[in-house]
Image: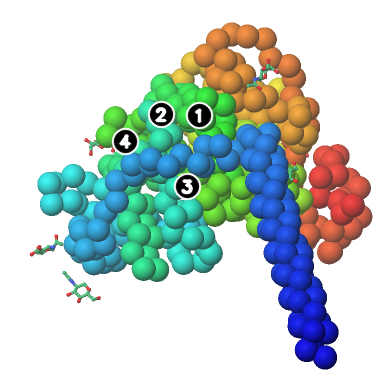
Amino acid sequence: MAFSDSDHEETKGTTKMMAGLIIATAILVVVGVLVITYYIRRSHRNIEARENGSSDERQIEDVELPSFELDLISNATSNFSSNNKLGEGGFGPVYKGTLPDGKEIAVKRLSRSSGQGIAEFRNEVALIAKLQHRNLVKLLGCCIQGEEKMLIYEYMPNKSLDFFIFDHTRRNLLDWPRRFHIICGIARGLVYLHQDSRLRIIHRDLKASNVLLDSEMNPKISDFGMARTFGGEQFEGNTNRVVGTYGYMAPEYAIDGQFSIKSDVFSFGILLLEIISGKKNKGFYHLNNSLNLIGHAWRLWKEGNLSELIDSFVQDSCTLSEVLRCIHISLLCVQQHPKDRPNMSSVVLMLVSETAMVNPKEPGFLVDKKSLEASSSSKPESSSTNELSLSVLEPR
Ligand SMILES: *[C@@H]1O[C@H](CO)[C@@H](O)[C@H](O)[C@H]1NC(C)=O
Ligand SMILES: *[C@@H]1O[C@H](CO)[C@@H](O)[C@H](O)[C@H]1NC(C)=O
Ligand SMILES: *[C@@H]1O[C@H](CO)[C@@H](O)[C@H](O)[C@H]1NC(C)=O
Ligand SMILES: *[C@@H]1O[C@H](CO)[C@@H](O)[C@H](O)[C@H]1NC(C)=O
Ligand SMILES: *[C@@H]1O[C@H](CO)[C@@H](O)[C@H](O)[C@H]1NC(C)=O
Ligand SMILES: *[C@@H]1O[C@H](CO)[C@@H](O)[C@H](O)[C@H]1NC(C)=O
Ligand SMILES: *[C@@H]1O[C@H](CO)[C@@H](O)[C@H](O)[C@H]1NC(C)=O
């Protein structure tokens, strides 16, 4: 009895040991597999990210981004008083501030909607701060405290382009040479964002109010990188969240959420038309028709009467051939198909030299959405008399 018992016990002990060994091995194997899968996945993701051209830059560890204390910023802006408010951007209000040393700053107080983590945000802002070009507004730093996220920019004393070109008296201050200087500056800033910087930024909200002017009336593009930070990661692709301003958005972006550097080119074309004509694309009104500014420009192009488009305030100061060239370029930029539009480096080349230019094809968004809806609901037969194509706006 005793013998068999102890024998039994011994076998039991061995079985236990065996079981333990098997379990330990199993655990080791499982852990090993998990670790290996993790590393494979990670390197895979790294490769993918590198192919997408994005995230190797994200791994920069030593980001030395100046950080400002909230106390300092609220003091500098008199507690974000409405007297100090400069305007309301797409991502939150902007305040003017004066630091204790007398330096003037602009503070963008971001609305709290973004679900981004602090570290990620800081990293992103540090990268954007490294984008430096004389036609981009300089980002000085950020301020993060609790729920508050703020971006600190250099202050631009002469406000923004829309403040001048759309104002009856101030537009006099911008003669043609100045306007041309501004046009070239914006184009160079965009070339830098699209091609020359390490990040390849698509602005996605280029418009007159996002072009700021320094003390010498040099243009500086603002709000670049905001779409990257808040509107998703892709360089080219499809987004559900359309960031932008109606009146400047390319048709493929406004309708399908499809964006690329060519949607920025479209916005640049609109901006160019606005600078030349002194009229807003959105809300453009012509006695005779329901065309928007693009449609109006296109009609004048076809009639060979482009000089009618030029702002009467610049007519005296301009070189006609230079302005006509700019109108031609703007029509190339607003062509309906993204692949027809030139890239920004070609645009700069066309602006500064006498290179031959192809004739533009039909632009996108010839007719205001509003007037289109009105005409199709009230008198559908009138659309047949309209010679201009509406194909862009037809549902697919
Ligand atoms: C890279 O792009 C592909 C498709 O173009 C996408 O499926 C993938 O998620 C992207 N990877 C990263 C890390 O963004
Ligand atoms: C804020 O301003 C007040 C008065 O101008 C000053 O006494 C105080 O030290 C300032 N605080 C900071 C943090 O700069
Ligand atoms: C700023 O606002 C805080 C609370 O909102 C208040 O305690 C503080 O006294 C204010 N400071 C100034 C300079 O107005
Ligand atoms: C631009 O700003 C500078 C400095 O504030 C000022 O001297 C100049 O008159 C401004 N120019 C225009 C056209 O307002
Ligand atoms: C109105 O449009 C017609 C063509 O539809 C054109 O012949 C005419 O010149 C236009 N009138 C004005 C004032 O633009
Ligand atoms: C061009 O526009 C001007 C001003 O509206 C007009 O007087 C002229 O007849 C137009 N010329 C042509 C060829 O349409
Ligand atoms: C821009 O377009 C020109 C003409 O199509 C082309 O030669 C050039 O390679 C393009 N540049 C870039 C950076 O895509």
Marking on residue 214: 4
Residue 326 appears left or right of 138: right
Q: Along the polypeptide, which appears first: circle 4 or circle 2? A: 2
Any part of residue 126 in sight: yes
The quarter of the displayed image where residue 18 is located: bottom right
Q: Which residue is denoted by mark 3 in the rendering?
A: 124
Which residue position is annotated with label 2? 133
Q: Is label 3 or label 1 in front?
A: 3
- Of circles 2 and 1, the one toward us is 1
Most foreground residue, 159 or 79: 79
Residue under circle 1? 197
Give the percent coordinates (x, y) of residue 51: 68, 34
Secondary element under disc 1, as helix, strand or loop, is: loop
Q: Residues within 10 Å of mark 1 (few under 14, many from 20)?
A: some
Q: Nearer the viewer, residue 72 or 221?
A: 72
* Residue type at numbered disc 1: Ser
Is the CB atom of the residue marked by disc 4 within 8 angstroms of ligand 4's nearest atom? yes
Tell me whether the residue at label 2 lies in contact with that at label 1, contact meaning CB atoms closer than 8 angstroms. yes
Mark closer to the chain start, 3 or 1 = 3
Of the residues under marks 2 and 3, which one precedes in the sequence?
3
The residue that appears at 59% across and 16% down in the rendered structure is 350
Mark with earlier residue (1, 4): 1
Q: Tell me which colouring the rendered structure shows.
A: rainbow
The CA span between labels 4 and 2 is 14 Å
Query: In percent of the image, x 46 and y 20: which residue is there?
Result: 318
- What's the residue type where badge 3 is placed? Glu
State the image coordinates of residue 131 (x, y, percent, origin top left).
43, 34
Of circles 4 and 2, the one toward us is 2
User: How far, Cα to Cα, is label 2 from label 1?
Assistant: 9 Å
> Where residue 106 sits: x, y (%)?
31, 50
Q: Residue at x 50, y 56 (%)?
A: 90
Amino acid type assigned to the residue bearing label 4 in the image: Asp
